[in-house]
Amino acid sequence: MTTNKDIKISTFTDTNNQKIIIKRCNLDDLDGVIKVNEEELPEDYPYFFYKSILDNYPESFLIAQNSFGKIIGYIMWRVEKTPSIDSLRYVNTGHLVSIAVSQGYRKKGIAKSLLTNSMNAIKKYKIHEYVLEVRVSNYNAIKLYEQFNFKISNIKKNYYRDGENAYYMTLKAKKR
Ligand SMILES: CC(C)(COP(=O)(O)OP(=O)(O)OC[C@H]1O[C@@H](n2cnc3c(N)ncnc32)[C@H](O)[C@@H]1OP(=O)(O)O)[C@@H](O)C(=O)NCCC(=O)NCCS
């Protein structure tokens, strides 16, 4: 079986001079990813859900590790066929499933790096659009997506289990 374990995507030094590694997620990393998810987001998923994203879209399932190898962030996407925002055609859409960075590591550019590298990786599926949902109260995440030129296309009412609305944000993928 091939392993993605050592597929390193990028290494950078954060604002505290700590080395951060961005790399592809591996099966062994899923417990660490789930831990970050459970600590940082109210939306959690069963193990098989993460595993199925990893099996199907491994290129864009990335993790961030600190210099001790601890997982301190992740991002995962899936690919869907959806009607295009500007025509009736069905196109491949990259749907951001989840992104989170551990509290002590925020505002150091980790999410930016995870997004940049994963959006690049998922292009191999000939993505026409990137889409995502974000809580209308999640100012930090909305600012992050706006930096990538995502625009609010719609509001999904009662999208979250607690009744909060979501912004549906979209971005046309650049042609290669
Ligand atoms: C949203 C989240 C992933 C951002 O991670 P991060 O590593 O801190 O983000 P970055 O350092 O890469 O910041 C990138 C941009 O996001 C925005 N941003 C992030 N944190 C911000 C804050 N506290 N205040 C204002 N803008 C913020 C800014 O535009 C920032 O760019 P800048 O540094 O040039 O101003 C992180 O806050 C998080 O994990 N939140 C909990 C989980 C979550 O909400 N996930 C998104 C669900 S849709």
Image: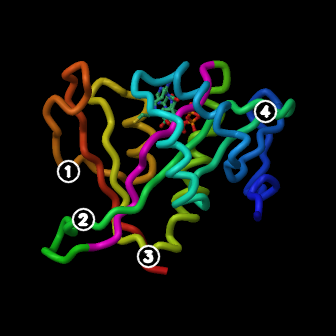
Disc 2 is placed on an element classified as: strand
* Crowd around label 4: few <14 · some 14–19 · many ≥20 (10 Å): some
Give the residue pinned by disc 3: 126
Please report the residue visible at 34 percent of the width from the left and 59 percent of the height from the top.
171
Query: CA–CA distance between discs 3 and 1?
Result: 21 Å
Please report the residue visible at 34 percent of the width from the left and 70 percent of the height from the top.
92
Q: Is residue 26 left or right of residue 145?
A: right
The N terminus lies in which quarter of the figure? bottom right
* Crowd around label 3: few <14 · some 14–19 · many ≥20 (10 Å): some
Check if mark 3's residue and mark 1's residue have beta carbons within 8 Å: no
Q: Nearer the viewer, mark 4 or mark 2?
A: 2
Q: Position of residue 87 (x, y in %)?
A: 15, 74
Residue 153, label in figure: 1
Give amino acid for label 3. Answer: Lys
Please report the residue visible at 44 percent of the width from the left and 28 percent of the height from the top.
44
Give amino acid for label 4. Answer: Asn
- Does the segment drawn in magenta span residue 106? no
Give the residue pinned by disc 2: 82
Precedes in sequence: disc 3 or disc 2:
2
Give the residue pinned by disc 4: 66
Precedes in sequence: disc 2 or disc 1:
2
